[in-house]
Structures are given as structure tokens and as C-alpha cells.
Image: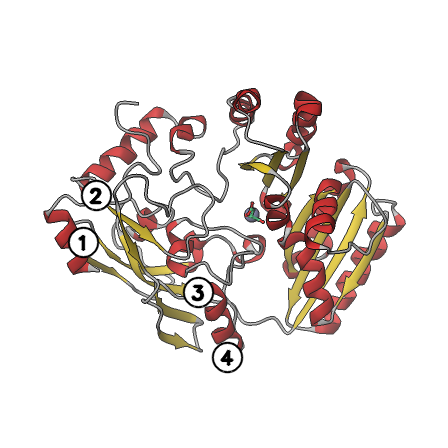
Amino acid sequence: MSQILRYCNNRNLAVNPQGGNTGLVGGSVPVFDEIIVSTVQMNSITSFNTNTGVLICQTGCILENLNNYLEERDFIMPLDLGSKGSCHIGGNVATNAGGLRLLRYGSLRGTVLGLEVVLADGTVLNCLTSLRKDNTGYDLKQLFIGSEGTLGIITAVSILCPRKPASVNVVLLGCDSFDKLLDIFKESKGTLGEILSAFEFMDYGCREVVREHMKLTNPLREAPFYILIETSGSNGDHDQEKLTHFLEKVMTSGLVTDGTIATEENKMKALWALRERIAEALARDGYVHKYDISLPVEKIYEIVVDMKKRLGERVKRVVGYGHLGDGNLHLNIITEVQDQQLLDHIEPYLYEWTAHYYGSISAEHGLGFKKKNLIYFSKPRVAVQIMQQMKAILDPKGILNPYKTLPSSNQ
Ligand code: MLT
Ligand code: ZN
């Protein structure tokens, strides 16, 4: 990697780092004549320490393969995404991917302990430590986490992995209003506490698309909202007791209209599929306008309702789902065909709405090529200028993933 970048930098050749190519904002695809530098062959595991749970591996390891390797040793990866079968850990780190279990294990900014990065001129920056604590100077690895390949190419990762939970339960609940859904969330945090490992939500439209396009049946009665809760703990009896207590509370107080619980692997997978396969189902439904927004949790569904009203008959479907526990909404608007007038009706209105509530216009998918000019909706001008200065220091010739993440300096 060092030789490739030195060669390209000397000749002013732009490069486009590419992992599993599963991103949603065009960060991993070239725009003009960039050379694709694929990490696909850098896929070996360097070491795993069963005392500390620290895994060190190369950047091109597929997330699911890492998880399988760890499961054999009674550990798991601290992140899980729908695209786990093809995304690379290097891409996950470079985009600071969030996913389904951030609620429990935190973001990669906390679990990544060290990185090896090759800089634009080929210099190898070795910050591949495995220390939990290290307050010596600036934490440079944080610069590269979420920088989408614009500051350096990550070649190796040191990551802290949790123990594989001995007991996992998945619950699917139906509920008839978003306010009730928020009450259920509050209740789950209080009653389930540390065993809560996912709190995902989806609206009725999501149920329809997975039924229509993936042929997946939701076992619950029809309801405007569904919640998928996962618990992970070290003691089955203890978790069961907590879960029963939680379910009694939400059932008797009328917060929930219907529910089902799964403890067996296949049934848990089937419930997860109703949530994990929404994006795939939507892609088959028509032309999809995808939005990935962070908002104060009580505001999350207001924008979906607002958009439905605003766009009315002009669209096929407006759906909302996502990582409620992290305040992250995936708002998807589906039309039969691409329609510029409609897009003008959605944007910048949606971004202004998000900025008004101090949300983020990209919660977990990054900016890439598609959203780079929207950065000002979520970051002040001074912050963007500092980012541009950092880019100029680390990549003075601008060869690393150009046209991505940051607007050009005159914008
Ligand atoms: C998800 O949570 O399913 C994805 O981040 C959303 C998507 O792929 O659109
Ligand atoms: Zn997501």
C-alpha cells in the first residue's frame, strides 16, 4: 500500500480506496479517473488476545468472517450491520459505521483502539496499539475514523471485542402510536438496563415492503409501528426475569398491542430479517430517496408524518425506520421514477428541518460524494475550514478520494 501511494502521489494520480463497496453515499466509487485501490486481498487476522478481547486484523477482512472467527472463541465483533456479509472492517472504520448494536457496545470511536494508516505520500503511520488508556498527545486515530478515505488508507485495525453473550432474546412488539413507542423505549432502558442490546423501530410501510418484495411475514397483528428489542446477557435466568418483568409492564399498561418473543436461533433470525431487510426491499420498490438523519429522539417520526403530508400523492411511499435507541432515523421516499421537481420539494426543506432541531443530516452513512456539499447543515463554517486545512496538511496534492466528504475550499 505504501508503495502504491508513493507511486501515485509522485505522479499526481488520484486514488479511490475501496473495501466491500457497500456504502450508501458514493464514497467508494470513483467519480472521474481515480485509480481504485481495493483492500480485498488484505484479509488476514494478525492476532486475537483472549484475555483482553483485542483483535488485530488487516483492513480487508469481511465483518461477518471476523465475527465467525470470534464466535468460535466465545467473543463477538462490537458492531453488526445488514451488509456484514460483504463490508470490510477497514470500510467500517473509515466511515465510522454505526449499525444495529451501537446502543450496547458504543461507536467505533470507542472500540477501535489502534490503527495503521498509510498516508498520501506512502508514509506508514503506525498507531496500532491495543491500549485502553493512552493519553500521550493527540489521538490521531480518531482523525481517520469516519474520514472516508480522504486523509489516509487504513491498513490494519486493533479493536476491542466483547464476550459472546450466553443468552440472547429477541422481542417484536406492535404499538399504535409513536408516543407509546417512546414510552416503551424509556421503560426498556429502565427495566432491561444493561442487557438491552438493540432497540430498532419500523413503521407499517416497512412491514408492507418486506412482505411484498422479500416475502417475509410479520407474525404480529397490523399496527402503525413495530419495535424490535434484543437483549444480550451472561445469565439466561436473570435475562428472562428482566424480560418478563418488562413485557408485563408494557402489556398491562396498554403500550403494546401485540408481541412475540424468540429465544431460538432461527426464530430470532426471522424476526431480525423483518428489520434488516427493509433497505433491500425498498430498493425493489421503486426509485428510493434515502435519508439518514440524527434527531432528538422525540422528533424522529415527526418528519416522516410531515413528509407524507407534504408529498402526498406524488410519491409511492414514505417510510421511517431505524435505530431509535441511537436517535437515528432512516427516512426513505419511494417514487416510480426519478423526478427532479419532487426532489426540489424534499431538499433542502428536509435538511433545513433537521438543522433547525440541531440534528445531523448524515447520522451513520457519511457524506461521500452525494452529500459532501450538505455538510454546512450540520457543521459550522469554521469547522469545515479546519477540516479542509487538515486535508491540505495530510494530503497536499489531494490524491486521496478527491471530490468526497468535504466541499471544495471555494464553496
Ligand atoms: C439500516 O440500518 O438498515 C441501514 O443503515 C439503512 C440502509 O441501508 O438504508
Ligand atoms: Zn442503519
Residue at the disc numbered 3: 62
Q: Amino acid at mark 2?
A: Ile
- The residue carrying pointer 1 sits among few (fewer than 14), some (14 to 19) or many (20 or more) residues within 10 Å by Cα, namely many
Q: Amino acid at mark 3?
A: Ile
Q: CA distance from mark 3 to mark 4?
A: 17 Å
Residue at the disc numbered 2: 399
Check if mark 2's residue and mark 3's residue have beta carbons within 8 Å: no
Could you tell me which secondary element the residue under label 3 belongs to?
A: loop
- The residue carrying pointer 3 sits among few (fewer than 14), some (14 to 19) or many (20 or more) residues within 10 Å by Cα, namely many
Q: Which mark is residue 5?
A: 1
Q: Residue at x 62, y 47 (%)?
A: 325
Q: CA distance from mark 2 to mark 1?
A: 9 Å
Check if mark 2's residue and mark 1's residue have beta carbons within 8 Å: yes
Badge 2 or badge 1: first in the primary sequence = 1
- The residue carrying pointer 2 sits among few (fewer than 14), some (14 to 19) or many (20 or more) residues within 10 Å by Cα, namely many
Question: Which quadrant: the N terminus?
Answer: bottom left
Q: In the image, is residue 49 above or below residue 346?
A: below
Q: Which mark is residue 287?
A: none
